[in-house]
Image: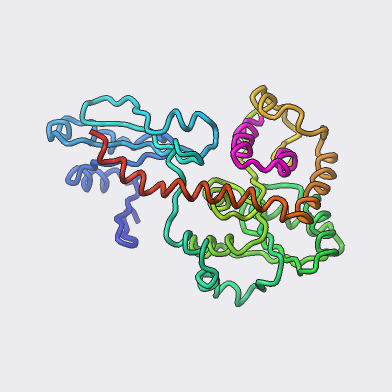
Amino acid sequence: MSFQTYRGWNIFDWNDAETCTKYFSENPPTVVLQTFQCGLPDWLDEIIYGEEFSASKKLCRIVNIEYLTAEKWAEDFHLLRGAARTASVRKYFFMPGFTPKTGGLILDKNFTECLKDKNYRKSKIESLTKSIPFSDADFKILVFSYPKDFSFFFEAVNEFAQKSSRKIHVYVAPGAGLASFKKTESEYQKTNFCVDYLPYLSQEAWDAFLCSMDFLFIRGEDSFARAALSGIPFLWNIYQQDEEFHLVKLKAFLDILNCPKINEISWLYNRNFGLECGPEAIDAWGNISECKNEADAQKKMAELLKAILFNLDGIKPAFRNFSKKTLDLGNLSEKLLDFLPLIK
């Protein structure tokens, strides 16, 4: 199917050039939201840069919404004008981010309701909790990760569960890291905490579930943004890049978060000891850890995670303050809509 309507939106498969050319030639777009500077399909390029569109005296605004990053260059690129081939097309960069000089993050209604209303969260995950144990009294950990050796996790959470007055419940999301978590679990004869494997969830249910946790192991961009807004303590598993350049992006975020107690474990959790660190990563981090291999890193991460879990109240304020500051920036979607009419 190359066309469908969902919640009032017309959605096209842009690979169907014939269908798209027919519709958009008759209804030329005046706004194009381009993501991550991905190239436009040929049929769209031909329409907005064609003679007919230029002769119509209309203006097409192309806004490139970039990857989320805490790096300083995001402030320099936000609302920066880019080059276009004709006068009838205007191109700009729009940067999500964590500072007033960026576009902030998306604050949709469902997520903001999840943040402030416990009963609303429960209503969104009611069907899920009929099949998976869920209690407000439990200490709940969500694991959504890339493939990892989770030995450090089992060692730390086992000891935390032994000494905690609350029952510890770990929920593992489907995806890239699921198999490696199960593999590590199979190597342990006994765990002192409960583990449940989640099904794939709707975005609404995922938001509600995430906001109901006490600690998060989170990956990706969208879920990372949700975690940052939630005020819940978390460790971010950032997507790996060549020469460990992702560690530069990680450090930029941690500098803004300002919670030094999670810095070393964040480095180790994201370090691939099979690769050499590039100069940018080394410059960003310096000598953050003495660990030089995965075995040493596992031992150190277990030690650090135990310290975090047993003293969680000590790091909660940093995450709550960061959440408040980011929420106070406002809604990226609204800022984008406010910006579009300003493009002349």
Question: Residue, x 23% and y 41% (percent of image)?
Answer: 30
- Furthest toward the bottom, the residue is 130
- Furthest toward the top, the residue is 279
Magenta residues span 244-267
* Whether residue 129 is situated above or below residue 268 in the rendered picture: below
* Quadrant assignment, res 189: bottom right
Q: If the image is split into quadrants, where does the N terminus sit?
A: bottom left
Q: x, y percentage for residue 193?
A: 78, 65
Instruction: Give the dominant element type of the magenta stretch: helix, strand or loop.
Output: helix
Relative depth, front residue between 323 and 191: 323
Q: x, y percentage for residue 101?
A: 44, 35
* Whether residue 71 is situated above or below residue 128 in the rendered picture: above
Q: How many marks?
A: 0
* Quadrant assignment, res 4: bottom left
Question: Residue, x 72% and y 52% (percent of image)?
Answer: 314
- Position of residue 185 in the picture relative to residue 16 (left or right): right
Q: If the image is split into quadrants, where does the C terminus sit?
A: top left
Colour style of the rendered protein structure: rainbow
Question: Residue, x 49% and y 39% (percent of image)?
Answer: 99
Q: Is residue 245 magenta?
A: yes
* Whether residue 143 is situated above or below residue 332 in the rendered picture: below
* Whether residue 276 is situated above or below residue 60 in the rendered picture: above
Q: x, y percentage for residue 250?
A: 62, 37
Q: Is residue 259 magenta?
A: yes
- Furthest toward the right, the residue is 189
Relative depth, front residue between 90 and 11: 90
